[in-house]
Amino acid sequence: MKVTIDNLSKKFGEVVGVENLTLHIEDGEFVAFLGPSGCGKTTTLLTLAGIYKPTDGVIRFGERVVNTVQPKDRNIGMVFQSYALYPHMTVFQNIAYPLKLKKVSKADQHDRVRQVANVMGIGELLDRRPGQLSGGQQQRVALGRALVKEPDVLLFDEPLSNLDARLRLTMRGEIKHLQKDLGITSIYVTHDQVEAMTMADRIAVMSGGHLQAFDSPDELYDRPKTQFVAGFVGNPPMNFVDVSVQASNGRFFAETESLRLEVQKERGAPPASHGGPVVMGIRPEDIQIASDPNNGTVSGEIFVVEPLGREDLIDVRIGRHSFLLLADTEDRHQAGERVSLAFDMEQAQFFDPETEKSLLWQ
Amino acid sequence: MSEQAKTGDTTVPRSRGGSNALKSYLGAYGFMAPAGILVIVFFLIPVAIVLYLSLTNLASSNFTSNLAIMEFIGLKNYQTLLNDQFARKIFFNTIFYVLVTLSIFNVSLALLVSLLTTHIDRSAGFVFRALWILPRITSPVVYILIWKRMIAEAPFGIINQFNEALGQPTYNYISTNPWVFVVVVNGFIGVSFGMIIFTSAIESIPRDLLNASLVDGSSKLQRIRYVIMPLIRWPLLFVVTYQTLSLLTSFVEIQLLTDGGPGLYRTEVWSLTAYHRALSNYFGNAQWGYGSAFAVLLVMIGVVLAVIYMRVFRFDELIAEPRVEAL
């Protein structure tokens, strides 16, 4: 089912939950709402669910306007961060609850619950109560309850946030697989950008009640349209430096008092013509520690080394600037060591410091 | 301790373990002491005194400064009570009063008010609940005076003024329908207790759970039936139990409104009888001993009911084991 959101606003008195949101979600698409706490992503989800009524704007499921349709008449399934299982019901009763409300016959209820439970791998837990299950099992039950009525739209409200890291990884894969298998249009709210990047077809990045960007994960990563998106997507986060970009003899240089880096024409020309100070962004993976210093490298001092296991996260100070970068653990870098850095300026991003909009992509 | 000895754990010496066990007992009793002392001073000791008094003939007619005149008369008071021609009527009055007030007001209406006020705008709900608390926080004398003024005979009573204005006959409500007003007057006070307990129980159901139910396809009414009601079972049983016992012992409002009348014991309840016999006898003879016999029976009925409720409702199953293992 296609989900169309046009100019949606939801206000709670004076407080703005979400403002002027326009999103067109395709049939069968997996869309993530990504943003920090209080950015309006859950508000939007609950408005889609029909728990909140929109203050303004139109929501369509397919061609049907659902603004004032009761949640029970929307045919949606929802999975909550807290699992929201009914503690007084068994696992079977929990999953059967949506069917019971639809007045599905007892025999059919039984068959469909069994079937869903087997898909979710909880077939042997049907007689237990939620209190007797682990977090991961509870989340499977919650997912089963959302799926059992064959919803048109699936809504996820940070469903994996309460699970431990390892389980989160498996569930991530399972949910993605299941969604592709069933082809149910899904909207997934999360503040974890890794979840959004790995699972979603497209990501709606939100901040302060506003949509920042709505694009595929690759697009968001390679061509961020705002500084917020650039900083929020990617882990470890992008480095930002205030620079000015100067043109001389058809070559372009990003400069600060302690840095002078050559930029390719396609990336250097727009910030140069913008004039004045701009914000340069460069991802940690685009900075290398050079083994042989040459005129393209910049020298700095290692401030701190954080071992991540597979690689080291290193904070290097150049003058008053600080850059995060990744290095092989084999190299055994130490704090205080002087190193030369090579910047891959083909990947550099430039933003207007006033509007925080990208100077490269519109 | 023997467990430790069996498993061969020699790192903890026996004597240490023993004093630890003693310490943990002391800690537990220490924490129980404040409540325990209150129960002993304000319940067990008075019950013992009343129990003793009920076995004597102490009354104002034979009361002198010499308490030695007080005679121990065994179960004679209880014998008199059982042969009292009005005791049976008063007993059934009490059952009627408790059952009707409890079921209509203290439980059903309280539940209805909490469900309604938690399903409307929050601040409006608050206002309605605040109104329902007024009867409870108003001094009983003032509250009963208001009612008396409302239902007084023509031309004084407010309701009768309306009756007159509408050309209807006027009534002396206290003599025509005493029970209706005894129940309503007490019921209006009784609603607020259950209402507060139920409202807080409903409000403390996680929002996600309530939202999940709507998304799963329930209407608001189905949500009440399948999710809210089962989740407030404990408060519901608690209110039934607690309010039964408190209605059983309350008599101030009845005393002020009808004083057990009109006529002979028409709205007299057991606890009011205990008061009348022991402290406010019409003939001027305060029969402390005999009144105590009534009071003792009431305490026994209360204790028996409480035990039955706890068994039938399985309160022990509703309470989780404490997470703290030892102090």
Image: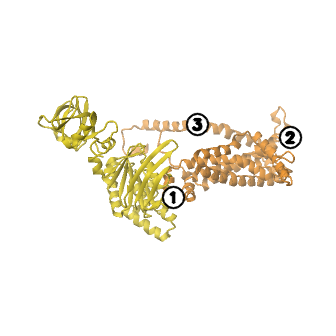
Place of residue B246 in the rendered image (x, y in percent of width and height, measured from the top left): 69, 46
- Residue A68 sits above or below residue A9 on the image: below
Chain A display color: yellow
| Quadrant of res A239 | top left
Label 2 environment density (alpha carbons within 10 Å; few <14, some 14–19, many ≥20) = some
Which residue bears the numbered disc 2?
B285
- Disc 2 chain ID: B
Secondary-structure class at tag 3? helix
Reply above or below: A51 against B37. Answer: below
Q: Give the chain of mark 3.
A: B
Residue under numbered circle 1: A69
Q: Is residue A331 above or below residue A256?
A: below
Q: Position of residue B124 (x, y in %)?
A: 61, 46
Q: Which mark is residue B33?
A: 3
Which comes sooner in the sequence, label 2 or label 3? 3
* Alpha carbon distance from label 3 to label 1: 57 Å
